[in-house]
């Protein structure tokens, strides 16, 4: 791609009231633009990042036999009444009427709708298990949309649902999905923890959250320093689902339980902050029972299906990458999430040698499958470099004055030092770095 053709409205101005690095840099870097409270546009670079995250999720879902579907966004209120959630969801559920006076809801999550495509179609234990998911815009009329796309009203979620004929099989699938989710977040290049979440009536390890570690996270986690154990402190505190419940700010783990030992090993628990990017949950028959989603077991007896639900916040993940990877200059994308991997910055486009060298490099890298951008804009070096840092490409190749002496530079975004490279060795050095 040519920078001169790219629509990327970078800016020096942070959005008013923005406090989070991801909110500030995704806006300033021209990834997103705000429409209204909790509503965002994804501009070309933002859309590329989202697609990268989606692709990784899709690949890992295919590995565990989960199938992608796409359900209607507009959902009849009747399904929500059938499950009893029309009441429970309250004002987060956006309702409206069509011209014939039918009431609809913009899908905030799709348990009911997913049960509806399975029930009466899947009728025998022989057709189970099934795991279906979608990558779909959700709408929740959040009381306090904030932090940019971290907590939007409209947001992209991967929501998956599994159907089983036994509790053992649901347990098995839950473990498979936990492993797949861990693989996804690892591939995105993020430091994370899987923590036990409050699972209400289901109890035990029936609900786990995937938390990206970041100081700005809204959740407080107790994590063990010697094993993988971690828990959302809501679990310790046994909080109700009440949105208004005040979460006390603990500074010492002793305030939690009276001791600071890990319940799984003799390790020490400490507190850290996390961003919830995924939530996996054993639903059991919570939805299949009221919605009458049954199958015939081996004895020909009708049984309620057992269900699991697996959510992942795709647009929130985009923000989480930046919460974990940024500095005072802007975004630092991980390799797998970057909108482009290499940015070739031509210092002076009037210099024919610089142009020729850069164009050549651009062609070579494109041919070898590297996602490369060439900054061929009629702008000063400093201006282009500031954009490169704000946007956060993993590598910027600087083709500048020193080309006459046979030298170019590689500026890795995550490091302070630039690497001086003889122009003929650039391609091999870069290939080495990109391995
Ligand atoms: P939260 O506690 O942050 O409100 P939730 O418990 O309501 O999350 P789920 O219903 O489990 O979230 O949704 C699955 C995933 O969707 C979450 O783990 C999160 O990553 C993402 N998500 C939820 N609400 C939003 C939102 N308003 N904006 C962006 N992503 C969201
Ligand atoms: Mg919520």
Image (cartoon, rainbow, N blue to C red):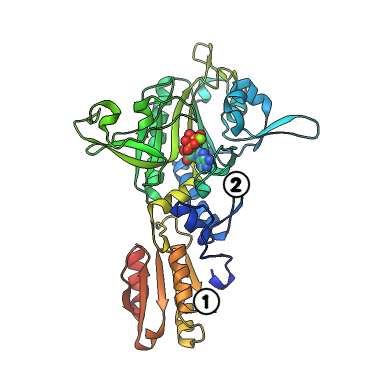
Q: For label 2, count other residues whose C-alpha is less than 10 Å away and answer few (under 14), some (14-19) or many (20+).
A: some
Helix, strand or loop at label 1? It is loop
Q: Give yes or no for contact between labels 2 and 1 (Cβ–Cβ under 8 Å).
A: no
* Residue where numbered disc 1 is placed: 376
Q: Is residue 224 above or below residue 407?
A: above
Q: Is residue 298 shown left or right of residue 183?
A: right
Furthest toward the left, the residue is 266
The answer to whether any part of residue 269 appears in the image is yes
Can residue 312 be seen in the rendering of this structure?
Answer: no
Pinpoint residue 163: horizontal percent, then vertical percent.
50, 26
The CA span between labels 2 and 1 is: 36 Å
Q: Secondary structure at mark 2?
A: loop
Q: Is mark 1 within 8 Å of ligand 1?
A: no
* Residue 37, percent from left and from top: 60, 47
Closer to viewer: mark 2 or mark 1: 2
Q: How many marks?
A: 2
Q: Tell me the quarter of the image containing the C terminus.
A: bottom left
Which is nearer the eye, 376 or 20? 20
Quarter of the image where one finds residue 195: top left
In x, y percent, where is residue 293?
Answer: 58, 20
Give the camera-side residue of 176 and 215.
215
Look at the numbered disc 2 and say if its residue's Cβ is closer than 8 Å to ligand 1: no
Residue 210 located left or right of residue 5: left
Q: Is residue 359 above or below residue 161?
A: below
Residue 261 quadrant: top left
Which residue position holds label 2?
A: 37
In this rendering, position of residue 382 left or right of residue 433: right
Q: Which mark is residue 400?
A: none
* Residue at image point 55% right, 22% down: 287
**Dot 1, how many residues are within 10 Å of its Cα: few (below 14), some (14-19), or many (20+)?**
many
433 vs 216: above or below: below
Which residue lies at the image location 80% right of the left edge and 35% below the top edge? 99
């Amino acid at each position: 791609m040519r920078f001169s053709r790219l629509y990327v409205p970078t800016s020096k101005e942070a959005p008013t009231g923005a406090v989070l690095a991801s909110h500030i840099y995704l806006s300033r870097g021209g990834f997103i633009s705000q429409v209204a409270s909790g509503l965002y546009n994804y501009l070309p670079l933002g859309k590329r990042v989202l697609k990268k995250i989606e692709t990784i999720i899709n690949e890992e879902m295919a590995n565990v036999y989960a199938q992608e579907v796409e359900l209607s966004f507009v959902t009849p209120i009747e399904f929500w009444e059938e499950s009893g959630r029309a009441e429970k969801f309250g004002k987060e559920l956006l309702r409206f009427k069509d011209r014939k006076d039918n009431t609809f809801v913009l899908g905030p999550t799709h348990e009911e709708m997913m049960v509806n495509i399975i029930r009466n179609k899947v009728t025998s234990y022989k057709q189970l298990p099934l795991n279906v998911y979608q990558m779909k815009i959700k709408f929740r009329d959040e009381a306090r949309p904030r932090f940019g796309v971290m907590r939007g009203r409209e947001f992209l979620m991967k929501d998956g649902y599994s159907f089983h004929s036994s509790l053992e099989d649901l347990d098995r699938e839950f473990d498979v999905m936990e492993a797949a989710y861990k693989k996804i977040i690892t591939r995105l290049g993020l430091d994370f923890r899987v923590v036990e979440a409050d699972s209400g009536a289901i109890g035990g390890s029936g609900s786990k959250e995937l938390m990206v570690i970041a100081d700005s996270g809204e959740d407080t986690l107790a994590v063990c320093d010697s094993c993988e154990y971690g828990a959302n402190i809501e679990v310790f505190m046994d909080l109700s689902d009440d949105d208004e419940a005040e979460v006390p700010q603990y500074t010492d783990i002793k305030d939690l339980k009276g001791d600071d030992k890990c319940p799984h090993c003799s390790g020490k628990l400490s507190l850290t902050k996390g961003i919830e990017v995924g939530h996996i949950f054993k639903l059991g028959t919570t939805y299949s029972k009221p919605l009458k989603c049954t199958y015939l077991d081996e004895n020909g007896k009708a049984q309620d299906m057992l269900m699991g639900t697996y959510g992942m916040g795709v647009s929130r993940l985009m923000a989480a990458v930046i919460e974990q990877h940024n500095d005072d200059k802007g975004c630092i994308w991980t390799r797998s999430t970057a909108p482009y991997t290499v940015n070739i910055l031509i210092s002076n486009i009037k210099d024919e040698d610089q142009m020729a060298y850069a164009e050549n490099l651009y062609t070579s890298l494109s041919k070898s499958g590297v996602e490369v951008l060439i900054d061929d804009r009629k702008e000063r070096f400093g201006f282009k470099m500031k954009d490169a840092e704000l946007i956060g490409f993993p590598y910027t190749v600087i083709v500048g004055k020193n080309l006459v002496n046979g030298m170019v530079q590689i500026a890795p975004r995550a490091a302070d030092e630039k690497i001086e490279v003889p122009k003929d060795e650039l391609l091999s050095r870069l290939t080495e770095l990109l391995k």
